[in-house]
Amino acid sequence: MIIPINPNFKTKPEEYSEEEKIKLMTKGLTQDSLGIHNSLNDLTKDDIEKEISQIVKSFGIYLEFNRDKMKFDRVKDWIYMIRVAIPGGGPISSDQWRILDEVANKYTVSNAYTGYPQPSLKLTTRQDVQFHNVKKKDLVNAIRDIVESKFYTLNGCGDNVRNTISCPISSYYGFDMNKLARKIAEYFRLPSKLYIQVFELDPNISSELENRESFQYSDNLLPRKFKIAIAGIIKINDSYVIDNCVEVRANDIGIVPVIEEGKIEGYQIYVGGSMGENNSYPTFSALALPIGTVTEEELIRVLDAIVRIQQEWGDRKNRHWARLKYLVYKMGVEWMREKVKEYSGIELGEIKDIDLSFKELHLGWIKLGDKWGYGIFIENGRVIDGKNGKIKSMIRYIIDNYYDVKLFITPNQHLIITQIDQREEFEKIFKEFGYGIRNGKAYSKLRINSIACVGFPTCKLSFTDSERFLPLLIDELERRGFSNVSASVGISGCVAQCSRPATHPISWVGSGYELYMLKIGGSNDQLGEPLIDWEENVIYLYQVPSKRLADVTEALLQLYEKNKDLGKDAGEVFRKLGNKKIIEYLKNHEKTRDLMKPHKFDAKIEGYREYHELLKERLNEVIKFKQG
């Protein structure tokens, strides 16, 4: 029996889920009624209570366990992940990076790329820094050390507005999206009183964290996590273009500057994007829809209104339907515009046509004013000494010897070093640390454009490997001759899809241990979807064994190469070919025909069927409010 997508909007308190009832106990993260301080400092056990593990997510802490050890030893080796919020990805000074690097040295290990334990930092698609494999005995001290950097773990995880992301370098073109990201992040920062109390931090930091106008979270915070992204503006030749490096429509709220004659005249607001799904219920990934434009003076008030609408209306009974996208797609664009006016007193302007297809990875040398920047390729965001060079040591050497540089994390898990005068010196440093070379060859185009999330062994949500698997998959595809194909691969270890894999033409989403589901046809402004035969109500390539991913990916890359004149990128080519032709092609390909068995997956199929039906209605509403 298919359960329809039926969110419980404006949920009555008596229908709250257990998670909502637990959040209520802390009165909006202001009271330690659960004994968080005592639990984190109790070293007689390595884990913490379930209720406390939920609350400390808002402090940037995830309770996890080593999935490898669980697989072989059947014992949960409890570990923690700490996430540091860095709005807009920076700037990060040399002193700040040094502190974060030392935290990694003191408290973390990773064997993701070397096969033996090493300290590392993990850069994320939300421009955060993550520390993995932290033991409980080190947890409180690690948080205290991080706070010394003047970056905080508040809002790192949990049911609140997460780290606000933006184009990292648009400030160098006269449009400071980083500053705007910091302003928005500060406005939506959680109360700091309990944070300071639990970790016994210097009370004086409360003035920095609290002395501001801010969003008023309810006693049970938001129904689910909430993500905001700001597109950037960069200059190419003599023209300003929108840089959608943040993949703005993949967020709950997307903010896109409206440029006229080289000036920002306002911002267009998009709502309802999210990658996350659930395999037990009909759900869907969705791109945010435009609802109108605002002036710079109106922006914060409108953002406040949208988050309050979600806070009051979002489903607090069913967490799988609690994201803003279900409110937007079920209630509609016109409803959202009216609610924004009701909550903020501001009537949104007309919807404009804005091209969001351009995405800059910000890699290599970049001229930034009278100095240079260099975007360092960090495979899957893992800053570590490994097969791609001694990346972690190289960055530490640079910040120790070139004090004036500033660093920025990109929304694609790379790192930009700015304020560089000495290009030749830096080129020598890159060479000395082995940067730019893997397996004796320069990083391939396919490797540079592909991406993965963390996955095994640390993420407890993950079904399988992601970060450890993608580099090996690319190695194999390079051996098969696809180094310089104009396509990319995205991998996520689970349906949360933190690495935004579906914005890549070929993406693999964990569906079981060493099993992956194909999503096909994504690009910067379009989402790839499962390979569904809508007439037969079946899904293909739902559980592909890891050892066969190279075969399927090879076949799809060959299909793209044969048909690349159909579109401007691989995603468009696959969309124009359509699922029927792709299914038929793979059924007849010698390397994939044995994998093409139909899978009856009602929840996935019905979720996407409803999404497409709702999308048609919403796009008609968008047309109604468009300019002209």
Image (cartoon, rainbow, N blue to C red):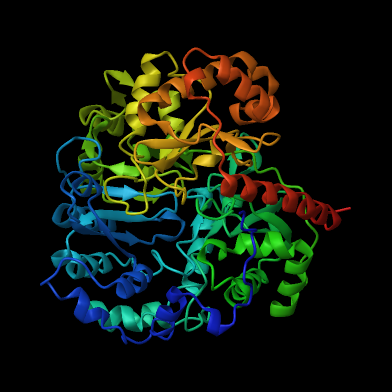
State whether residue 523 appears in this view: no
**Horizontally, is 98 left or right of 532 in the view?**
left
- On screen, residue 342 versus residue 378, left or right, reads right
* In-front residue for pair 30/536: 536
Res 208 quadrant in image: bottom left
Horizontal and vertical percent for residue 346? 74, 74
- The reply, left or right, for residue 400 in relation to residue 406 is left
Task: Note whether 101 is above or below 515 in the view shown.
Answer: below
Query: In this view, which residue lies farthest toward the front?
Result: 1
Instruction: Say above or below: 41 vs 471.
Output: below
- Residue in the picture at 64% in, 54% down: 288
> Image quadrant of residue 315?
bottom right
The count of marks equals 0
Q: Quick one: quadrant of the N terminus? A: bottom right
Q: Position of residue 55 (x, y in %)?
A: 36, 74
Q: Is residue 116 above or below residue 481?
A: below
Task: Specify the farthest residue to the left.
Answer: 44
- In terms of depth relative to the viewer, which is nearer, 419 or 273? 273
Q: Is residue 135 above or below residue 613?
A: below
Residue 518 seen from this side: yes
Farthest right residue in view: 628
Residue 480 relative to residue 308: left or right: left
